[in-house]
Every structure is written in C-alpha cells, then in structure tokens.
Amino acid sequence: MSVLIITACHSIKYQDLTLSKPRLSNTECKLVKHELGETCVSINPQRIIVTEQVSLEALIALRLKPIATVDTAFVASKTNFLRSQMDGIHYIGKESQFNLETTLKLHPDLIIGTYGINAENYKLFSQIAPTVKLQNVHNEWKETLMSLAEIVNRTATAKTLLIEYQQRLEKLRTALSEKINELEVSVSRFHGSNKLPEFRSQYSFPGSILAEVGISMPVNQRQLIKTPDDTIVKLSLEKIDLLDADVLFVAVDPGAKELFKKYQNSQLWQTLNVVKNQQVYSVDSSYWIFGSILSANAIIDDLWKYLSLEKVHN
C-alpha cells in the first residue's frame, strides 16, 4: 500500500481498508457516543493511537501509554515536556497529515483524539480501528480527561489525579492568603508562526487554572472578552500595554525568540510597570498554552516558584 497522507486542502483517495478493521462482538465492547457518531470500543483497549498531543498527555497521565501519536503542528511540542515518557511511542505523521499505511501496520484497537479527528479522516480511521472524537474546550480540560478515562476504563485513576490536583490548588491558595484577591496576572504567548504577541483570556487553558487558584487577569483584558470562545487576543506593539499586570508570564515558542527580543527592546515594552518591577517570567509554552492534568500541575509548580510571598507583597 502506498503512503496515504490526509491534508485539509487536498482531495483524498484511499483503498478499502475494511478487511483490516478489527471485528468486536457486542460482549467485547461498549458503545461510545461522540459528535461524529457512535463507536463500539473495546472494554480495555491496549493499542491506542492518539491524533493530537492533549490526548497523548492525558493517556500518559492515566498510565496507559499509546502505541503511536503525531508530531505537533504547533511549535511548542509536548514531546519535549513528556520526553522521559515517550520511549517506544511511534509517530504516524503530523497533526492533520497522517500516514495511514503506518497506522494500519500498528494494528490499533482504538484511535482517539480531539481536533486531530474530523469528519473526513474519521471515515478513514474507522476502517482501521474503532475511532472516537473527543471534545476539546480549553477551560474544560478536566471534562475531556474524564471522558477519555471513561472510554479507556481508567476512571478511578482520573478521579485520583483530579483530587490530588485540587489539593495542590488549596495549598497554593492558603500560601497566597489574602493577597490572592489583589493579584492580577497576565499570560502572553509569542508564537513561532505569528508576528504578533497575544494574551490568553480567563477562558483559555492557563486562564482557567489561574481562575481556579483565585487569581484574576487584568480588568482591561477581561473587558475585551465577549464570549467563552474568546481564548486568545492578538496584540499589536501599540496595544502592548494590555499585558501590564502585577505578574506577567510569557510563553515563548522556540521559533519566536527573536520576536520576543524585538518587543523587549522596544520603548513601549520598557514602559510597562510589570517590566519596571521585574515581574516578567519566561515559561515553557509546551505546557502553559494547552494541555491536560500533567500540564496543569506543571503550571501550579511555576506559580509556586514565581509567586513567592515576598514577590506578592511587593
């Protein structure tokens, strides 16, 4: 079979893969309803392929390592963040550019993902193995984790992870004490493929974690957010003052380091109070911008590191 690549901008021709698709009896599988249909999934799937990196992280957290994943289309790859746990995992191409021949040869018993699965490639994947599309809402990452856990029979593990996460939130709230109500924090990203910086709203992945801690984002930022779908606001240099806060976390993609330097050297950047107060911290975009429970815990680690009581009092 020739290598088959799925892209969003080309028509797709493919061979009939039906004979290779695993046949599961009703006693061997459970019916999972999702936005692209209904899929009968093995009770305990073991050979799982994930089509994007949020599900990759979630599966690893659930102690069920997938047999294959994709290389990210984003610059901030989670393969760096998860490096120590990536041994033995194969690659089936990049997000939205899947190698179906490799996928077929791996004999998966489940293909699962969020934005990595659309109506077109769902038909293709479903001929290879039971395929499920998960919902991906940035500030509802815990719901996505639980949905995945239910599908792969790891609900108890997911609940334990979330209980431990909640306990860590409580400890951080206690440490910050009453200062938590006075603190305003900005989260910005300098993107490798975009010439403009951005800030992440309270509905973004990092914004939702800050909100759980009880930390607010600047009022000027919140006033620009109209709906929960507004997770990102891009900024021109003239609007850079919107990043001003008590603390600014800047996630810089590897391909955006020069862009970040340009802004740091600008006069407008130097006028920000958060810059004058030396409260700007560069953080890892591979877990600050999107993710699941492991990324959320890594953000909590950074909040402990940078929001020390001395800095908060200042």
Image: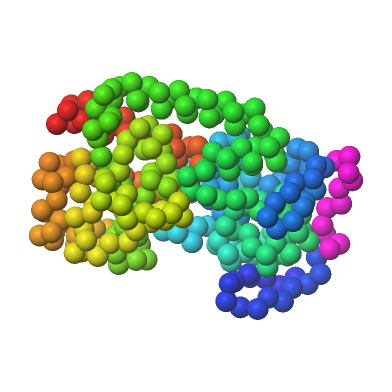
Judge left or right: residue 39 versus residue 51: right
Q: Which residues are magenta?
A: 18-28
Expressed as whole percent of the image width and height from the top left, the position of residue 139 reads: 47, 45
Judge left or right: residue 293 versus residue 29: left
Q: Quadrant of the C terminus?
A: top left
Q: Is residue 27 magenta?
A: yes
Residue name at image x 55 percent, y 62 percent: 94
Residue name at image x 49 percent, y 61 percent: 73
Q: Quadrant of the N terminus?
A: bottom right
Camera sees residue 165: yes
Camera sees residue 256: no
For the stretch drawn in magenta, the main secondary structure is: loop
Expressed as whole percent of the image width and height from the top left, the position of residue 165 reads: 47, 28
- Between residues 288 and 210, which one lies in front from this camera angle? 210
Residue 255, quarter of picture: bottom left
Residue name at image x 42 percent, y 47 percent: 203
Is residue 216 placed above or below 99 in the rendered structure? above
Expressed as whole percent of the image width and height from the top left, the position of residue 237 reads: 20, 64
For the rendered model, the colour scheme is rainbow
Q: Is residue 149 magenta?
A: no
Expressed as whole percent of the image width and height from the top left, the position of residue 70 reads: 57, 56
